[in-house]
Amino acid sequence: MKRCALTFIVFTFAFVKFSVAQKLAFSYDASGNQTERRWICINCPSARQMAAEKKTLDKFNNNELADGLTTERGIKAYPNPLKEILNVSWGAPDKIFLKSIDVYSVGGNRVYKKAYNQDERQATISFQQLPPGTYILVGQYSDAKTETIKLIKH
């Protein structure tokens, strides 16, 4: 029982220490009229901590680490809407790559399928033989995650 109580106290202290709260503070003049209302942040990070976090986030939002590896996955297909040719480019984090691209018609029929190597980052897909309509591009990554893009052919 003592161990449970001690654990509860430790977690409660940690929660209170690391929780952030806002408080509304008022200022009044000599006659009792409210002159100012402001928010006060309790346990908020300092400006120095926020600047350090922003610098770290900027580094990762830049899509590249120091050694030039991509940190985000993403497929770009252009032009969309398309007429005859679709250009596809993609990025993926280190040790993950785009394994395959499938294109399906709205009816669910697969009209294109191709597997890709780790070092490939772009492809060109011909839509010349396909009728105008809506298609779905499905990219499957080596970690079994997928990404879909809706395509429109004129």
Image (spheres, rainbow, N blue to C red):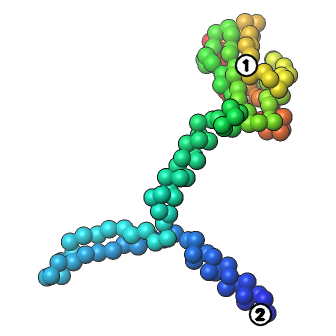
Residue 110's image quarter? Answer: top right
The mark tally for this picture is 2
Q: Nearer the viewer, residue 111 or 7?
A: 7
What is the crowding at mark 1: few (fewer than 14 residues within 10 Å), some, or many (at least 20)?
Answer: some
The location of residue 90, given as percent across then percent down, is: 70, 26
Q: What separation in Å lies between label 2 and label 1 (alpha carbons)?
A: 62 Å
Look at 64% across and 81% down and name the residue there: 12
Rendered-image quadrant of the N terminus: bottom right
Give the residue at mark 1: 122
**Do the numbered discs 2 and 1 sit on residues whose CB atoms are within 8 Å?**
no
The location of residue 14, given as percent across then percent down, is: 63, 76
Q: Which amino acid, mark 2?
A: Lys
Q: Secondary structure at mark 2?
A: helix
Q: Is residue 103 left or right of residue 134?
A: right
Q: Which amino acid, mark 1?
A: Gln
Q: Is residue 95 above or below residue 152?
A: below
Rendered-image quadrant of the C terminus: top right
Q: Is residue 61 left or right of residue 86?
A: left
Look at 78% across and 21% down and name the residue there: 120
Residue 9 makes an appearance in the image: yes
Q: Which mark is residue 2?
A: 2
Nearer the N terminus, badge 2 or badge 1? 2
Q: Secondary structure at mark 1?
A: strand
Residue 100 makes an appearance in the image: no
